[in-house]
Amino acid sequence: MLLVTLAGCTSGTELPRDSAKPARTKSSATTRPAVTQRPYDKMPARPLGEAAVNDRDHAFLQEAFAIQIPAGHKVPPADEVAVIRRMDAKNGELAWMSDGRTFCYGKIREGYSSYSCGRLPEEAPAPGLLFTIWGEPDRVSNGENNAAVRVVSFVIAEGGPARFDHVKRSKETGPVHQAVARFPSGRMVTFLTFDRPYGPIDPEAEICRSDRKICFPSEDLPL
């Protein structure tokens, strides 16, 4: 999988990824599930319901696409953009998939926006999950505002439109935000974001889909 991350930010020092994240070892004896069966969708997915761009999202999209998209990817038509979270007129999170294997995720903050784009891995991180990004800081630190920094995680899950929510939620962890997109084939994917304070993780914190067929640790995401 090729993953490209691009950020645009103001002056300051970006916090490193959360140092509380434990190192991982991959067992060669473990068989991991494939992402999805071929053939993959060749057409883009389109957002459903409130995830679709509306007239109020104009300033948000302007802010989102004011920085350069990673090489090899391009700004999508508005009807392909899934808005995962609307924080205010210019801040939030969004994602899109130009085909069944290619995605882009944007974390948009005034003065500090970033994109992660690439292809889904050949091996799924866990059953029902297609891709994860674990705990990236949501702003630039000036050395005095560390307590205000939130780390934001991003997940692409197979299927929809069932809701995901916290089963065990740590103190000060934010709600689960989600957007569902559907390919012309009928296949659906769910984009999820959630945040927490920078610092130690809770290994028991968990998020599940409403039918409990997909569950994963929210602070120790499988990669």
Image: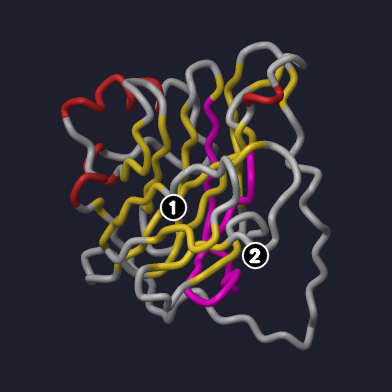
The residue drawn where x is 75% and y is 19% is 13
Mark 2 — residue?
222
Q: Is residue 123 above or below residue 21?
A: below
Overall secondary structure of the magenta section = strand
Sequence-wise, the earlier of marks 2 and 1 is 1
CB atoms of marks 2 and 1 within 8 Å = no
Q: Which mark is residue 18?
A: none
Residue 23 percent across, percent down from the top left: 83, 59
**Element at label 2:** loop
Residue 71's x, y, as percent?
Answer: 54, 38
Range of magenta residues: 113-136
Left or right, 43 with reference to 31: left
Res 4 quadrant in image: top right
Q: Amino acid at mark 2?
A: Pro
Alpha-carbon neighbours of circle 1 within 10 Å: few (<14), some, or many (≥20)? many
Q: Does residue 179 belong to the magenta stretch?
A: no
Q: Viewer-proximal residue, 105 or 117?
A: 105
